[in-house]
């Protein structure tokens, strides 16, 4: 069992509606030893791949993607959710549904930071319905860049996001794949590594 | 001239209304060598200080704070701006005005992640009016924790945020202090290090 799965077992909390709360160590407060390990583990899993840029989505993907980008030594780009007054120039837009906030968000990146032919590693904290990842893949595709791979911390395999993404042929690496979880018993079952 | 100032001079863009766009290297796309340097530089400037936790605010503070937290080897906590369905339990709330988005936001942290007596280093990308930093200081104070210091990437000294915070007696370290900038000539003048 790897460090992330151990942490999920010890500190994760299961709530009704298939909600896994990991905000004591992953997406509100962040355990720094775990963060370091996550970066190194993705570096290991995508060893030998050409990666030009790490792409994630604000806000909870940023810490993870920062650690990954520091391990790869390549720039980080994060898709934004709302339009600030400082954003000028051409942008690529997509729409994603937030499982956490139960709403649709428009996301975008400035076109000048995603270039044709760039090999992009997409990174995020959760994969459930896959909407966020599909939005990020869509941004990469609009730029004529290339998805080199997708790195996820926690995948919920009882939702169909992972299946949809693997069916499209992408190399998807999830550090913890949850097969089932029970909010009454707090029992969490992981899939074997695929 | 340090690495951040050099980058501001070479890649920053000045727009009307005292807007400095640094989204090619600091808060949309992030230069990873610079990010690493920022973490190490804050580690150096707060050397000898007891730091238990790094606190920032989503979204653009997170990458910077991640690098700082990795350098200090302490947990990172980021204040959130909207309430997700996964957030339960007691929270500390504050209000901050966003210079970028021209609106007020409610920010919060879960009370369980800021404890009495903890020494907190607050980190953010910009300091202008100081509203975000004052909100973060307020959260620390509600927890009876202690502000060990404040680390800012870019301070605009022609706005009064820095002055207000220094007057309150906090150790504030800014990596680049901009005295003036001109959107017609693109000239940017830095203050001498204080």
Image (spheres, coloured by chain):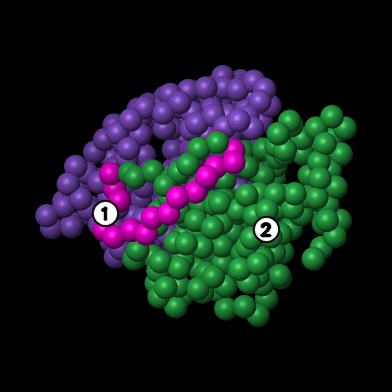
Chain colours: A green, B purple
**For residue A164, above or below residue B157:** below
Q: Which of pointers 1 and 2 indicates the residue nearer the eye?
A: 2
**For residue B123, above or below residue A61:** above
* Residue B168 pos. (x, y %): 42, 24
State the residue in front, B136 or A161: A161
Residue name at image x 29 percent, y 60 percent: A90
* Residue A35 pos. (x, y %): 67, 53
* Residue A106 pos. (x, y %): 42, 47
Same chain? Circles 1 and 2: yes
Quadrant where the N terminus of chain B lies?
bottom left
Q: Which residues are magenta?
A: A85-101
Q: Which mark is residue B14?
A: none
**What distance separates the C-alpha of mark 1 from that of mark 2?**
34 Å
* Residue A76 pos. (x, y %): 49, 61
Residue at the spot of label 2: A162
Residue name at image x 44 percent, y 38 percent: B172
Residue name at image x 32 percent, y 40 percent: B100
Q: Give the left or right position of residue B4, taking residue B51 as reference.
A: left
* Quadrant of res B78: top right
| Residue A9 seen by the camera | no
State the residue in front, B109 or A164: A164
* Quadrant of res A152: bottom right
Is A100 inside the magenta-drawn segment? yes
Residue at the spot of label 1: A88
Is A28 inside the magenta-drawn segment? no
Q: Chain of mark 1?
A: A
Q: Chain of mark 2?
A: A
| Residue A128 seen by the camera | yes
Tags 1 and 2 in contact by the CB under 8 Å rule? no
């Amino acid at each position: 069992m790897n460090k992330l799965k151990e942490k999920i077992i010890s500190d994760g909390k299961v709530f009704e509606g298939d909600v896994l709360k990991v905000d004591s160590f992953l997406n509100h407060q962040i355990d720094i030893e775990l963060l370091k390990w996550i970066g190194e583990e993705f570096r290991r899993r995508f060893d030998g791949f050409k990666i030009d840029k790490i792409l994630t989505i604000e806000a909870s993907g940023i810490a993870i993607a920062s650690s990954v980008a520091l391990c790869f030594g390549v720039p980080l780009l994060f898709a934004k959710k709302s339009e600030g007054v400082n954003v000028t120039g051409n942008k690529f837009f997509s729409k994603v549904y937030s499982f956490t906030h139960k709403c649709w968000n428009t996301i975008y990146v400035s076109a000048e930071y995603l270039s044709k032919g760039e090999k992009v590693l997409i990174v995020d904290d959760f994969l459930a319905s896959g909407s966020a990842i599909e939005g990020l893949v869509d941004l990469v595709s609009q730029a004529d860049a290339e998805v080199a791979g997708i790195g996820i911390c926690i995948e919920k395999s009882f939702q169909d996001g992972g299946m949809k993404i693997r069916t499209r042929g992408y190399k998807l690496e999830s550090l913890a794949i949850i097969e089932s979880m029970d909010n009454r018993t707090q029992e969490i079952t992981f899939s074997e590594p695929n």
